[in-house]
Image: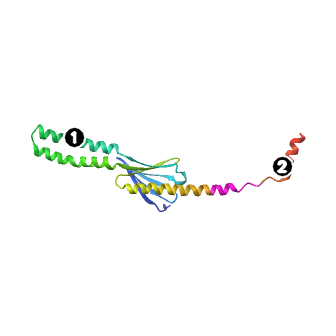
């Protein structure tokens, strides 16, 4: 069985897992890779309950860059003012500078997170650089889910307009007569 056409919407990358999120004709599909194990989960567009977009600092990333900045910065200060070795202090400070830049960039830009909640599962996408793409994916998922759910409601309303046939007259009279004669 070959899967239908899928369009890559976004990714969710963690320390030990990689997740790619695709859009198919009838669902949002997540393909997760943890080591050698691949799992797929789907949120059908007709079952979408909520789509959210929010920004987050990324606690793990923030703490790691802060820790490295503080460690290398304090080593550079100790080398400069206690050991009086300015060349070594300059080298350590230059090594700590990229961590400081990454920390400041994360504080300014943050991470946009788009989450799609279904009845039984959810899909998460993180966008650290492409803010416009995050908003576009959010809008696309909202409009597709609304379109599919409206079409589903219209089909149900057409089916409910067709009323079941009423029972024949002689059966209705027989039931009333049988109850009255007893």
The disc at residue 37 is none
Determine the secondary structure under disc 1: helix
Residue at the spot x=28%, y=43% of the render? 64
Judging depth in this view, the residue of 134 and 19 nearest the camera is: 134
Q: Position of residue 31 (x, y in %)?
A: 43, 53
Judging depth in this view, the residue of 62 and 33 nearest the camera is: 62
Q: Position of residue 67 (x, y in %)?
A: 26, 41
Any magenta on residue 87? no
Left or right: residue 159 compared with residue 27: right
Q: Position of residue 139 (x, y in %)?
A: 46, 56
Quarter in which the C terminus is drawn? top right
Residue at the spot x=29%, y=49% of the render? 105
Q: Position of residue 42 (x, y in %)?
A: 49, 52
Q: Which residue is mark 1?
A: 71
Q: Give the main secondary structure of the magenta stretch.
A: helix
Any magenta on residue 161? yes
Characterize the local packing of mark 2: few (<14), some (14-19) or many (20 or more) Cα atoms within 10 angstroms.
few
Q: Is residue 59 above or below residue 12?
A: above
Q: Which residue is mark 2?
A: 172
Determine the secondary structure under disc 2: helix
Q: Are marks 2 and 1 in contact (CB under 8 Å)?
A: no
Characterize the local packing of mark 1: few (<14), some (14-19) or many (20 or more) Cα atoms within 10 angstroms.
few
State the residue lying farthest toward the right: 181
Quarter where residue 155 is shown: bottom right
Left or right: residue 130 compared with residue 170: left
How many marks are shown on the rendered structure? Answer: 2
Q: How is the image coloured?
A: rainbow
Residue at the spot x=84%, y=49% of the render? 172
Q: Which residues are magenta?
A: 155-165
């Amino acid at each position: 069985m070959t899967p239908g056409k899928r369009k890559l919407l976004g990714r969710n990358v963690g320390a030990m897992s990689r997740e790619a999120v695709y859009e198919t004709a009838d669902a949002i599909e997540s393909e997760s890779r943890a080591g050698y194990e691949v799992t797929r989960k789907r949120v059908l567009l007709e079952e979408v309950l909520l789509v959210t977009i929010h920004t987050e600092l990324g606690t793990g990333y923030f703490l790691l860059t802060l820790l490295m900045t503080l460690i290398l910065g304090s080593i550079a200060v100790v080398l400069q003012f206690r050991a009086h070795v300015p060349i070594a202090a300059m080298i350590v400070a230059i090594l700590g500078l990229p961590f400081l830049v990454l920390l400041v960039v994360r504080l300014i830009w943050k991470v946009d997170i788009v989450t799609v909640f279904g009845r039984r599962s959810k899909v998460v996408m993180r966008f650290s650089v492409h803010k416009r793409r995050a908003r576009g994916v959010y809008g696309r998922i909202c409009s597709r889910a609304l379109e599919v759910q409206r079409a589903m409601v219209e089909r149900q309303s057409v089916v409910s307009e067709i009323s079941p046939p009423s029972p024949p007259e002689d059966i209705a009279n027989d039931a009333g007569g049988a109850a009255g004669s007893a």
